Amino acid sequence: MRNASSPAPERRHDVPPESVPGAAHFGFVAVPESEKVNLVRRHFNTVAPKYDFMNTLLSFGVHYAWKRIAVGMMDLKEGDRVIDVCGGTADLALMAARRIGPSGRVFLYDINWAMMVTGRPKVESSPYHNRIVYTQGDAESISFADNSLDGAMVGFGIRNLTHMERGFREMHRVLRPGGKLMCLEFSEPVTPWFRFLYDFYSFRIMPALGRLLAGSRLAYTYLPESIRLFPGPGELKSKLESIGFIDVRYRLLTNGIAAVHVGVKA
């Protein structure tokens, strides 16, 4: 829950989407489920050209450290086959590709072609580019066979799905028994005074910078709203366990701004 003393966000949904048949969240706005995927696609088409730059600016570069920690928690081995769901501009894919050796493969999987194209130059200039395979597809219906992969990871993307649990179930399906899931996602700071500052930064400063530097205030209003609606670490752990993952654990990063969850398919 938000701190009562935190600045109010600029817009809210009037009726929670879960109480409206066929509705989903797009930030704080209730939209028909059938429209969300197109809204998310347009959102990322808008931000793709400056996505990496804005991530680095808005996080002060800390997101790279979060990603390194998250990939490290997967304990990947040489020869592993890993899917990077909602892989976007390939930061996680490149970090994983370094760990799996020449015989391993990372399948960068994303519904948004603009995001994948934006990250392609840094993949092509990397010594690990031959280990990364691009696949465009829907995270809620992954085009891989059952029990075919050693690892599945998703970084800052699962909250954009219309049906988050469906995406996790698909990752569970494609993992072999003993395969590992990793989810890196934004959360909420645990210290009240830091949460107050973070809310002010998220709902006031970020949208202004988005308008000034990326040409879209709306895109960077959606971002903090979608973060606030994402399940807390304990709740997400329970959801993953209910899907069938075992040994689920999580680590909070930077006072809880982000959280890494890892789990194993039984």
Image (spheres, rainbow, N blue to C red):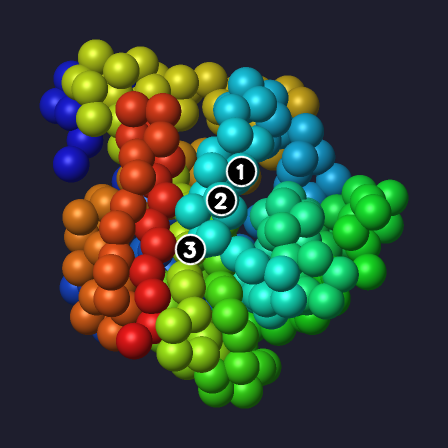
Residue type for callout 1 = Arg
Instruction: Please say if the residues under marks 3 and 1 sit with CB atoms less than 8 Å apart.
Output: no
Mark drawn on residue 182: 3
Mark drawn on residue 1: none
Judge left or right: residue 197 versus residue 71. left
Circle 1 sits on which residue?
68
Q: Residues within 10 Å of mark 2 (few under 14, many from 20)?
A: some
Judge left or right: residue 110 versus residue 200. right
Kindly identify the residue that appears in the image at 26 percent across and 51 percent down. Answer: 249
Q: Quadrant of the N terminus?
A: top left
Q: Is residue 196 above or below residue 90?
A: above
Q: Is residue 51 above or below residue 154?
A: above
Residue type for callout 2 = Gly
**Residue closest to the eye, 220 or 154:** 154
Q: Quadrant of residue 254?
A: top left
Instruction: Tell me where residue 264 appears, x and y as whole percent.
Output: 34, 66
Judge left or right: residue 8 versus residue 222. left
Q: Secondary structure at mark 1?
A: helix
Q: Residues within 10 Å of mark 1 (few under 14, many from 20)?
A: some
**Residue closest to the eye, 254 or 209:** 254
Mark drawn on residue 72: 2
Q: Secondary structure at mark 3?
A: strand
Kindly identify the residue that appears in the image at 67 percent across and 23 percent down. Answer: 213
